[in-house]
Amino acid sequence: MTDISTSDATGRRNPVAAPGPRTAADAVTPQLVARLVRGVVAGEQPTKGVSRSPFTGEVLAEIPESTPEDVATAFARARAAQRAWAERSFAERAGVLLRFHDRILADQADLLDLIQAETGKTRAHAFEEVSVTAIEARHYARMGAKYLRPRRRVGVLPTLTQVTEVRHAKGVIGQISPWNYPLALFAGDAVPAFMAGNAVVTKPDTQTALTALRTRELIIEAGLPAELWQIVVGDGPVVGPEVVDRADYVSFTGSTRTGRDVAQRAAARLVGASMELGGKNAMLVLADADLDKAAEGAVRACFSSAGQLCVSIERLYVAREVADAFLERFAARTSALRLGNTLGWGADMGSLVSQRQLDTVTAHVEEAVCNGARVLAGGRARPDVGPLFYEPTILDGVDAASAVCTQETFGPVVSVYRFDSEDEAVAQANSTPYGLNSSVWSRSAAHGRRIAQRLHSGTVNVNEGYAAAYGSVAAPMGGMGDSGVGRRHGSEGILKYTEPQNIAVQRLVPMAPSFGMDDQGYAALLTRALGAMRTLRLK
Ligand code: NAD
């Protein structure tokens, strides 16, 4: 590890990790790109977008772009393949998911290279994507049949009315995903859609299309019919609406601003949509927290994937009596994080993904500092490490008018606020329109749980930043308020991809007067029957 020790205003500067064995260009060879881009549905002479290495700014790949006609072709192919797939047994579909699980674990080196090359994140953060995708594949393979199988329900006239709830695949899911978790968001949301018998047409972000294309290859090798998963690429505002306009259900992950447009477009067609959107996530360090563990956890929660993680923490509320002791620990750990700009293990934080991200982060920090914030760690771009690197940054004394206080930065920047009472901390944590993820630190799990239930947030992690809830895929995960609609994971993460159907068989007597009874007599009989059902505690 090389330590660049020039000091800044805070007296510290993040060191640079020893270079890994390879660069992004070593991993993304022209041969690999030529093979992978064949997976994009595009014409003979397509226009091309580019994916650049965030580590160096060099062009990694030119990616063919899909026209509206290509999107129509993708949907037609997916629709044709879906019918046969929906006929396959749960066991056959589960088998594909389990083999996919094995493939992504076995071929992880390959995937980790691509994720690092396209996103600029560290290998450890890329591995989070591999592991959560494997967990999701295993979960829906093992639980899919249970979630989806026909269920008997109590009929209007018990035993005389036999009701079965049946789940049908929606058809073709239109999936639009961002660049920040290109494997986990791309595959993780498609896996339950496939288990439920759907086809999927995905528009990944051009910047991370290669990871998506490689992932598709792996699941096809695991037995998914190739036509069942179509990939279209191109400008979001051009290709995205084409996907929304043809989908039987829309699975969108991205910013709240784009999500509103996509939701309106889906609503106009009367198709359902799940919206996984932005956040301004809060962490509460209560007075009874273990401060070393909380500081360690805060580093992971704020700076994983350089803060370009939807569930990452950007607001930190600390009990006043422990604030100085906590901040000393947190700032020391943050300043020691090693920045990494090559492929391989060993670095603690990578690059931002694009100039747009760097501009937002820079603007948020500069404005906060202009308004009087103090920089406890970081606070600067690091062009000496790579064109898009920014140090992990802690701001104290942020003015409420600063954008960093309320708007999503989506970068390695956290603002610290002190609180005098837990009521105040809860009110502050709940003070934005978002509600994606929160974190609470206390030595008492029961205390942590009580505070958690008061937070307006789809997931709350107690004594962890985000990974406990994110990785626990048996329970739903998603956003309240401006952070989204619908959930991924658990039963909701798969049932959203189905149409429920109620099949009711009436036996022996009709749902009408019979045996010479008139309407009045029938009403009197039903009145007695309803009273009896209540007495018998029928549901
Ligand atoms: P974005 O909204 O700009 O883009 C997301 C996707 O939508 C991209 O594929 C983009 O090409 C496409 N798109 C853009 N305009 C479109 C349009 N008009 N119609 C249809 N599609 C369109 O978001 P981003 O900057 O790529 O991603 C970062 C954002 O995503 C952050 O706000 C982050 O919090 C959020 N995010 C949320 C989750 C979650 O699970 N809640 C997960 C990851 C990221």
Image: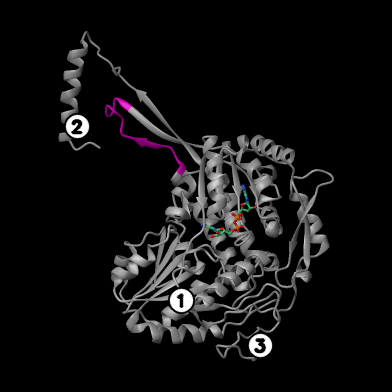
Looking at the rendered structure, which numbered label has been put on residue 257?
Answer: none
Reading the chain from its start, which is encountered first: label 1 or label 2?
A: 1
Quadrant assignment, res 316: bottom left
Reading the chain from its start, which is encountered first: label 1 or label 3?
A: 3
**Secondary element at tag 2:** helix
| Residue 230: image location, x then y, percent | 68, 45
Quadrant assignment, res 343: bottom right
**Secondary element at tag 3:** loop
Residue at 78%, 68% in the rendered image: 58
Q: Which residue is mark 3?
A: 1
Ligand 1 is in which quadrant of the figure?
bottom right
Along the horizontal axis of the image, is 467 left or right of 129?
Answer: left
* CA–CA distance in space, label 1 to label 3: 23 Å
Looking at the image, is 62 positioned above or below residue 41? Answer: below
Along the horizontal axis of the image, is 53 left or right of 462?
Answer: right
Are the residues at dot 1 and dot 2 in contact (C-beta closer than 8 Å)? no
- In this orientation, does residue 196 appear? no
